[in-house]
């Protein structure tokens, strides 16, 4: 059973940075799709970044492109979301998620996909002055 645990959230001032981590366990396959998404109170889930481990091409939502960076430590099965130049509108609960193949990545998938095969419990990010 896949288990995902996010960490690294917190409170920062606008312009600050945070690095979120997602520790994955129970992985039995080398190929899967990973997504970072967030959800603010009263709002729909928003896909932020995704990749397919077969090619490791990362796709970003326009709202975070240039500010957020998705990376992986394959040896440790830990995924990271480096978030720079944070804005108040980035305040949300942040989640990592995994889908087994067949799965899709890309910007359109980020926009449309709202449910995932596995996701963690989330970590809260608050950006305020």
Image (cartoon, rainbow, N blue to C red):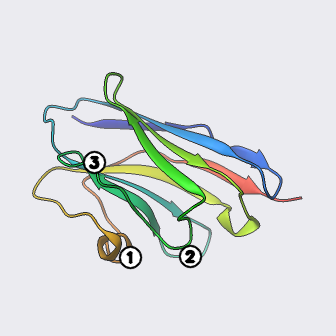
Residue 51, by quadrant, is bottom left
In the image, what residue occupies the spot 62% across and 60% down?
92
Seen as rendered, the residue at the extreme top is 75
SS class of the residue under badge 3? loop
Against 65, is 69 above or below? above
Q: Label 2 crowding class (10 Å Cα cut-off): few <14, some 14-19, many 20+?
A: few
Horizontal side of 119 relative to 127 (left or right) equals: left
Against 88, is 10 above or below? above
Percent position of residue 39, x then y: 54, 65
Percent position of residue 11, x then y: 77, 47
Horizontal side of 36 relative to 28 (left or right) equals: right
Near-viewer residue (52 or 112): 52
SS class of the residue under badge 2? loop
Horizontal side of 125 relative to 57 (left or right) equals: right
User: Where is mark 2, residue-wise?
Assistant: 43
Residue 56 has which mark? 3
Residue 111 has which mark? 1
Near-viewer residue (6 or 13): 13
Task: Please name which of the two marks, 1 or 2, marks the residue nearer to the observer.
Answer: 1
């Amino acid at each position: 059973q896949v288990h995902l645990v996010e960490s690294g959230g917190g409170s920062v001032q606008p312009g600050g940075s945070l690095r979120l981590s997602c520790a994955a366990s129970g992985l039995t396959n080398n190929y899967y799709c990973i997504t970072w998404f967030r959800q603010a109170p009263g709002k729909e889930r928003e896909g932020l970044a995704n990749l397919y481990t077969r090619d490791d091409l990362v796709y970003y939502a326009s709202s975070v492109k240039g500010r957020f960076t998705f990376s992986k430590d394959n040896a440790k099965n830990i995924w990271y979301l480096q978030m720079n130049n944070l804005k108040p509108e980035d305040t949300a609960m942040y989640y990592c998620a995994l889908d087994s193949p067949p799965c899709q990545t890309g910007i359109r998938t980020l926009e449309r996909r709202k449910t995932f095969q596995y996701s963690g419990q989330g970590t809260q990010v608050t950006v305020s002055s």
